[in-house]
Image (spheres, helix red, strand yellow):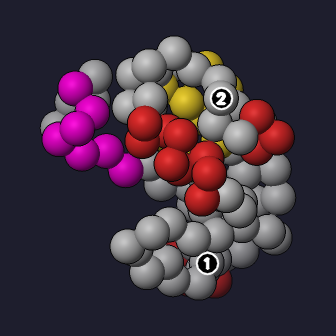
Amino acid sequence: MCSLGLGGRGRAGAEGAGVLILADGYPGKATPIAPEVLEEASRKKLRLYVEYPSALPGLELGQPRAGARGSGSWWRPTLSGPNCPECES
């Protein structure tokens, strides 16, 4: 895995590497991802972990909500899928 600052525009990471795009402004500001970053990640077959994205193509993202019973806490869930061979189901 390597980390990628948004200023890197997706040029970090060898082909097939895992790349982290982390949310500096969470929960006050979502993370913008430039289309060029996603295009380059696709070309290089990078595995992206995008924390708190403002938008992703083909997905409708809801508004953030505070934790259970209005506790004021914020949850940071992690999602995985069948394309993540290192992740256990």
Q: Give how far apart the Cα atoms at labels 2 and 1 are.
A: 30 Å
Q: Earlier in the sequence, mark 2 or mark 1?
A: 2
Amino acid carrying label 2: it is Arg
The reply to whether residue 27 is in sight is: no
Q: Quadrant of residue 53?
A: bottom right
Res 11 label: 2
Amino acid carrying label 1: it is Pro
Indicate whether residue 30 is drawn in magenta. no
Q: Quadrant of the C terminus?
A: top left
- Counting other residues with Cα less than 10 Å from the Cα at mark 2, is it few (<14), some (14-19), or many (20 or more)? some
Indicate whether residue 83 is drawn in magenta. yes
Q: Quadrant of residue 55?
A: bottom right
Q: Which residue, given by chain and number where applicable, does mark 1 sit on?
A: 64
Count of numbered circles on the image: 2
Place of residue 78 in the rendered image (x, y in percent of width and height, measured from the top left): 44, 48
Quick one: SS at disc 1? loop
Place of residue 86 in the rendered image (x, y in percent of width and height, measured from the top left): 28, 22
Is the C-beta separation of discs 2 and 1 under 8 Å?
no
In the image, is 75 to the left or to the right of 9? left
* Picture layout, residue 76 above or below residue 88: below
- Counting other residues with Cα less than 10 Å from the Cα at mark 1, is it few (<14), some (14-19), or many (20 or more)? few
Predominant secondary structure in magenta?
A: loop
In the image, is 85 to the left or to the right of 42? left
Quick one: SS at disc 2? loop
* Picture layout, residue 38 above or below residue 48: below
Q: Residue at x 50, y 66 (%)?
A: 56
* Picture layout, residue 82 above or below residue 33: above
Q: Residue at x 81, y 50 (%)?
A: 24
User: Which range is magenta?
Assistant: 79-85
The reply to whether residue 30 is in sight is: yes
In this view of the protein, which residue sits in the foreground, 12 or 22?
12
Q: Residue at x 40, y 74 (%)?
A: 59
